[in-house]
Image: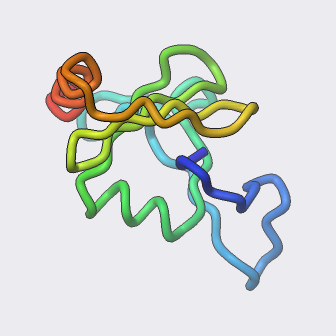
Amino acid sequence: MYPWCTRPARNTVPGEHAADCDHITPRGRGGPTCSCNLAPLCRRHHRLKTHGGWTYTQPERGTYLWASPHGYTYLRNHHGTLDLGADLTTQHTAQRLRRA
């Protein structure tokens, strides 16, 4: 569910690549461990999100709004990834996501 990632978590084969269940709202901030608060990320993108400054929210089930550390935003759902760019509106959205 990371922008443009082609590694579907449901097809994960042990030893081929790892998939992680990421807490959308971190456990440390009160996020529950339930299907409503977990999103699949391949290991590479989970680490990039955790340590690389990327953030995201889930405006609705199956749809993820990502913000890059450089202020770009991307919408990811079952149709693919939509680059929302970095205009003033999306920059404001990215800033709000980073503070959330």
Q: What is the image's colouring?
A: rainbow
Task: State which quarter of the image contains the C terminus.
Answer: top left
Foreground: 82 or 98? 82
Image quadrant in which you'd find residue 89? top left
Residue 31 locus on image (x, y percent): 37, 29
Task: State which quarter of the image contains the N terminus.
Answer: top right
Image quadrant in which you'd find residue 91? top left
* Residue pictured at 63% horizontal, 30% vertical: 35
Foreground: 36 or 46? 46
Residue 33 locus on image (x, y percent): 51, 35
Q: In this view of the protein, can residue 27 be seen by the observer?
A: no
* Residue pictured at 57% horizontal, 40% vertical: 39
* Residue pictured at 41% horizontal, 27% vertical: 57
Q: Is residue 87 left or right of residue 40?
A: left
Residue 77 locus on image (x, y percent): 65, 31
Extreme residue in the bottom direction: 15
Q: Is residue 72 left or right of residue 57?
A: left
Residue 29 locus on image (x, y percent): 24, 32
Q: Count of labels shown?
A: 0
Foreground: 89 or 20? 89
As displayed, is residue 56 above or below residue 92? below
